Image (cartoon, helix red, strand yellow):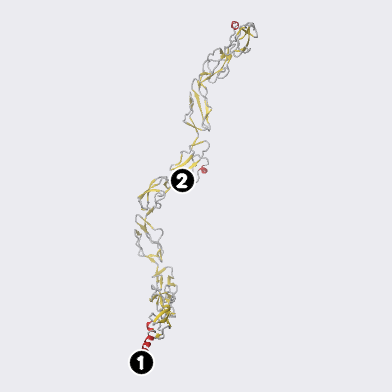
């Protein structure tokens, strides 16, 4: 019995030991990247551990062992430390040769720009845990050797020791010589001068090849200040200026320029150009321009015109369209023309105006047209038309119109009055003043009933003369319109009306027949004139047969209505 009991106890202890081990967490089970190993190989259940990142990395993990497994309590994944910008070096550049950003382990390589060289031993920097290692590299300019010249050449610039980009300028001491070689050299990126030091030689020039021209009296060499004479082929012209031989060669490049004329304006005021689209014309070539409605050719007042490019490179006329403008009509007899015609005077402009004294205005306003101001003329001198006087003839020269204040004479035909010449004047209102009509003479005045002339002294009367008439005894002259006591000679005829009003005849027999008698005066025959009144009364034993008792009657051109009296009735 004792042996089995001991065996059982050993088995129990072994099982307990294995169960305890199965609760531990092992170091090898921590598998994060870029971390430092933890201190122990295993940790008991419930223990925590801090896991640090490797050098050059930032971050950490905090883990807890729970039932044989690591649980993360806190974590900041390990990442490479960042470095600032590595720094720029003067006259140099850098680029990343390891890595793609400025973090732990990245490396940059420095190079110098053209003309500069690296004076530092180390030309790269690497991002470490504490930042960039090494110092900034230094680039210095490449050097060139000192310049030495002979006594005839002077040099300006840094001749003792040139740096990259330095320029040395050379000139001859004598003004009669010129540099033979380069007058300017520079220090190159290789530390060498771009050319050798020049010398001086006598100033001479050679005849150039001239396109479209020839040199006159060509020489092998031309001395200083010599003038080059040359001529150009037809259609070409000498370049402006005189070429002289100088230390820099010819002062002016002798060239022959083609003679051309430029068409500067192709749109303003232009309706059509022939040929279309061409703006440069050789000598002898032509074009035609047609201006638009409100424009005309400059200085010509033409709408369409041809232009020719001449041998001197100028147009025979300027090929430009300009606005149609009308000028101030100083010669049109306008009153104060500058006051009326100012401001806009382009095509279509309208202006009010008035004319000088002695001239008639032809329209209320003037209009600017291609032909100038219309109407034409604006003002016309006031004139009188030739007078048309019936039965007369102008004395002297006969014209269709006469100026103001003109004086002319006319004479009536024979048998017409007046007999003497008549002078008439054209007044400022264009009317003839002083006209007398030529009228025929009148013969003897006509007979008038119950009348006779009072002053007839001749057998023929002139126009305008009058003859007076008087009525016979007891007849009364009617002088109320249209009657008068005169007849007038007018253009060979007697004009006027004369009327003698008749008296009335009242006989005794007629009065007895009507039972009336004169109220006053003798009872005898009565001849009262026109408009006279006579008072009657009834004879004895008779009374008036009518209304009222007024028996007065008026003579009316030989007619008088006599009243009627009848016998009184018995007892009246």
Position of 223 relative to 360 (above/below): below
Position of 302 relative to 567 (above/below): below
Q: Report the residue that reaches farthest toward the bottom.
A: 2
Nearer-the-camera pick, 12 or 151: 12
For disc 2, the neighbor class at 10 Å (few under 14, some 14 to 19, many from 20) is some
Q: Please name the residue that numbered disc 1 is placed on.
A: 5
For disc 1, the neighbor class at 10 Å (few under 14, some 14 to 19, many from 20) is few
Dividing the picture into quadrants, the one containing residue 456 is top right
Q: Position of residue 408 (x, y in %)?
A: 51, 28
Q: Report the residue that reaches farthest toward the front.
A: 1
Q: Please name the residue that numbered disc 2 is placed on.
A: 346
Q: Secondary structure at mark 2?
A: loop
| Residue 350 visible in the picture | yes
Q: Quadrant of the N terminus?
A: bottom left
Spatial CA distance of label 2 from label 1 is 141 Å
| Residue 119 visible in the picture | no
């Amino acid at each position: 019995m004792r042996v089995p009991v001991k065996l059982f106890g050993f088995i129990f202890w072994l099982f307990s030991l294995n169960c305890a081990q199965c609760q531990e967490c092992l170091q090898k089970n921590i598998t994060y990247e870029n971390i430092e190993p933890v201190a122990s190989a295993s940790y008991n259940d419930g223990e925590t551990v801090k896991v640090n990142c490797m050098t050059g990395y930032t971050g950490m993990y905090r883990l807890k062992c729970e039932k044989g497994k690591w649980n993360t309590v806190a974590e900041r994944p390990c990442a490479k430390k960042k470095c600032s910008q590595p720094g720029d070096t003067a006259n140099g550049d850098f680029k990343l040769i390891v890595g793609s950003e400025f973090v732990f382990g990245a490396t940059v390589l420095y190079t110098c720009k053209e003309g500069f060289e690296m004076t530092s031993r180390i030309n790269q920097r690497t991002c470490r845990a504490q930042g960039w290692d090494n110092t900034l590299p230094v680039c210095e300019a490449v050097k060139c050797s000192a310049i030495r010249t002979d006594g005839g050449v002077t040099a300006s610039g840094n001749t003792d020791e040139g740096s990259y980009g330095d320029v040395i300028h050379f000139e001859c001491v004598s003004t009669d010589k010129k540099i033979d070689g380069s007058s300017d050299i520079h220090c190159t990126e290789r530390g060498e001068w771009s050319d050798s030091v020049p010398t001086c030689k006598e100033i001479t020039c050679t005849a150039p090849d001239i396109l479209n021209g020839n040199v006159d009296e060509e020489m092998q060499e031309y001395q200083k200040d010599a003038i080059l004479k040359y001529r150009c082929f037809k259609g070409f012209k000498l370049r402006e200026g005189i070429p002289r031989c100088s230390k820099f060669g010819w002062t002016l490049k002798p060239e022959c320029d083609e003679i051309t004329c430029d068409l500067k304006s192709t749109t303003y005021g232009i309706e059509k150009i022939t040929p279309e689209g061409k703006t440069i014309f050789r000598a002898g070539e032509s074009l035609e321009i047609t201006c638009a409605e409100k424009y005309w050719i400059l200085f010509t007042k033409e709408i369409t015109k041809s232009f020719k490019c001449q041998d001197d490179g100028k147009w025979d006329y300027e090929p430009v369209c300009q606005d149609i403008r009308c000028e101030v009509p100083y010669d049109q007899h306008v009153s104060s023309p500058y006051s009326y015609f100012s401001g806009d005077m382009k095509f279509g402009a309208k202006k009010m105006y008035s004319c000088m004294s002695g001239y008639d205005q032809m329209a209320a306003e003037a209009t600017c047209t291609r032909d100038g101001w219309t109407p034409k003329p604006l003002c016309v001198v006031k004139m009188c038309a030739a007078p048309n006087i019936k039965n007369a003839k102008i004395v002297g020269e006969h014209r269709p119109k006469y100026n103001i204040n003109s004086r002319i004479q006319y004479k009536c035909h024979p048998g017409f009055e007046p007999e003497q010449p008549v002078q008439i004047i054209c007044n400022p209102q264009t009317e003839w003043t002083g006209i007398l009509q030529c009228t025929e003479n009148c013969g003897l005045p006509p007979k008038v009933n119950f009348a006779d002339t009072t002053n007839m002294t001749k057998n023929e009367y002139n126009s305008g003369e009058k003859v007076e008439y008087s009525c016979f005894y007891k007849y009364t002259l009617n002088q109320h319109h249209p009657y008068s006591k005169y007849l007038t000679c007018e253009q060979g005829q007697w004009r006027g009306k004369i009327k003698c009003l008749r008296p009335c005849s009242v006989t005794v027999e007629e009065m007895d027949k009507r039972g009336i008698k004169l109220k006053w005066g003798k009872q005898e025959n009565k001849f009262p004139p026109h408009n006279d009144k006579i008072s009657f009364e009834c004879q004895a034993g008779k009374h008036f047969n009518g209304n009222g008792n007024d028996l007065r009657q008026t003579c009316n051109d030989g007619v008088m209505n006599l009243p009627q009296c009848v016998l009184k009735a018995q007892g009246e």
